[in-house]
Amino acid sequence: MTSFLSILTQYFGFSSFRGIQQDIIESIGAGKDTLGLMPTGGGKSITFQVPALAQEGLCLVISPLIALMKDQVTHLRAKGIKATAVYTGMSRDEVIVALENCIFGNYKFLYVAPERLSSELFQAKLRRMRVSFITVDEAHCISQWGYDFRPSYTQIAQIRKLLPGVPVLALTATATPAVVEDIQRQLGFREFNVKRMSFERKNLIYSVMKIRQSPEQELHELLIRVPGSAIVYTRSRLSTRELAAWLVAQGISATHYHAGLTNREKNERAEAWQRGKVRVMVATNAFGMGIDKSDVRLIVHVDVPDSPEAYFQEAGRAGRDGKEAHAVLLYDSHSVATLHRRIEDTYPPEEYVKKVYEDVCYFLQLAMGDGYGITREFNLEEFCHSFRHFPVRAYNALQLLSRAGYIEWADAEENRSRVMMKCHREELYSFHLPPLMDKVLQHLLRTCTGIFSEYAYIEEEEIAHALKLAENVVSEQLVELSRRHIMDFIPRKFIPYITFTQRRIEQEDIVLPPSVYANRKHELSQRIQTIIGYLQTPECRSRYLLAYFGEKEAKDCKHCDNCMERNVLPTIDEAYVRQRILTFVKEQRPTSFLQFHFADIPDSVVGRVLHEMMEEEEIELSPASEAKPS
Ligand code: ADP
Ligand code: MG
């Protein structure tokens, strides 16, 4: 067996393991059920990829994030490692191809979305695979006490039964002590075995600030005080755009990001920011997973997040290089009330949830007793409009109905288009295709490796861009190639739908079990209490967060706002203030102190510097001076 270290160097190009990576790898490598706890960005992927490559067989990876899954598959394939993925939205043919490859094709990694685990097709194929071990990424999703419980994760226990003797590696970045225990229990660990790394981030300076005027002003000042790359988190898609535009108008380089952008926009913006071409990324929580920039100096939260787990992960994206970095949480006098309201929005009254069920049935014209297994297109916006529902609450009601098993609801989880060749390579020469079609085909053959044996993701927009064609022209060629049975083209779908998993019943008969409603609502309110506590605590902020994650022995960080008992952000650069004043005098010819007002510099600072400059006779203000001929 090749050593773990040589695999790390050969495939990943790193010279040594980081933190507890090696401990985790040796533990799972020795066949022991293992739970690895490492902070985000700690390098969890290596801990299953390296041991999987060191052994015979296939590593089954369960992950809830389709985008991340596709991303990892792409990266592994680029290294010449055979990897594939199975998730919702793939056609049956595609799934079969992927799974057969895992049985016969000597594949090393099969990524599956948890909701696939219960499918009979999947289970039947899985029995025939030679699995080395199971990796459960984001393992906290299996625990109802966690902040991101996903019922489909509970299927993993069943999967273990199909693969007797196969060990499991669970990985997570956020787990309170109760969750750590629960994960191991739920996954049926033969022996409890946790490899834990301290979550302390010594170079990260936490502070909490009350918004004095507006979030924009605070943000602007922060960005002037802390130079370098930054991420600003906000909860609404709209405000990502507005804030970024506002910053740009102030002369600060910024862009925005949220889940509603096209893949191309997302990639371009993430890359511009990653390469330092754009300084500030204003984003929703959709930004961050899989992002790996080491020199982020500042993370600002303009809205208070609703869990300490989420806050810790997002704040933790600053200062990966070990140099000083700031995590600032802004709040205002409404923040606490807003947080409480989020509990009510996420878990609206049961009567309301039942009403939504009833309304959906009317909307889709489903008669009583009808509906078992029926799938219908469902547009949430239209629904809310016709039935006068408040979108956030209706959305959450649908989530609850879906968790309680009454419906399956796929929100507009965008899935990419994909293609696979349906002919042999040799046949290609005999086709004599029209030039445009040939151009598109040749492009695919050049850019998608393995397209003869498996489906490859494509993006029409990208192909259009590369070939200088219109996007609809590219789509037409793909459809035509598919019609001629040269390839199978599965266009992306944006259509959200609802499937009824039971017959329509009377709304009074709807039951939301505690595991779906009461318990979870209680946990959410506890997390919200913890975050409110974070805002209000007079103690060390780092210690407060670490205690929540079970590190009770942590020491004061000695540099957060509470430890220092003052504002801990760097002071504004005086040279910058002087420059602004000089420019202002030159351009505006002010006649009084009162005219000096800069959006980004506190008036007190302007006043002090102005005073100094007058003393030094660097500037002079008087109506007379203006009148003086020079
Ligand atoms: P996590 O899943 O824990 O958030 P990832 O597995 O995505 O983290 O890894 C984060 C980053 O750390 C990646 O860019 C990865 O290449 C890098 N990394 C992981 N292990 C090492 C190592 N031993 N040496 C250097 N970089 C590493
Ligand atoms: Mg990860």
Image: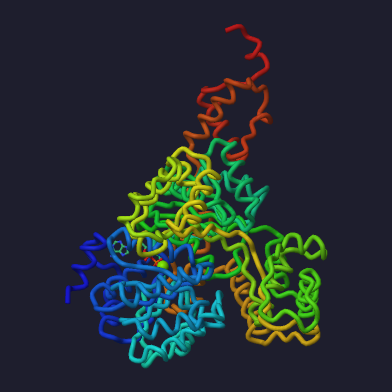
Front in this rendered view, residue 549 or 441: 441
Which quadrant of the figure has residue 210? bottom right
Assign the N terminus to one quadrant of the image. Answer: bottom left
Front in this rendered view, residue 553 or 196: 196
The image position of residue 6, as x and y in percent, is: 18, 67
- Residue 602, above or below 188: above
- Residue 550, above or below 611: below
The image position of residue 84, as x and y in percent, is: 38, 68
Is residue 295 in view? yes
Q: Which residue is drawn at 30% across and 72% down?
A: 105
Which quadrant of the figure has residue 361? bottom right
The image position of residue 35, as x and y in percent, is: 38, 81
Colour option used = rainbow
Assign the C terminus to one quadrant of the image. Answer: top right
Q: Residue at x 41, y 70 (%)?
A: 97
Q: Residue at x 81, y 85 (%)?
A: 508
Does residue 559 appear to the left or right of 362 in the view shown?
left
Does residue 256 appear to the left or right of 169 in the view shown?
right
- Residue 50, above or below 304: below
Quadrant assignment for ligand 1 = bottom left
Front in this rendered view, residue 475 or 258: 475
Is residue 209 in view? no
Front in this rendered view, residue 309 or 513: 513
Does residue 531 appear to the left or right of 393 in the view shown?
left
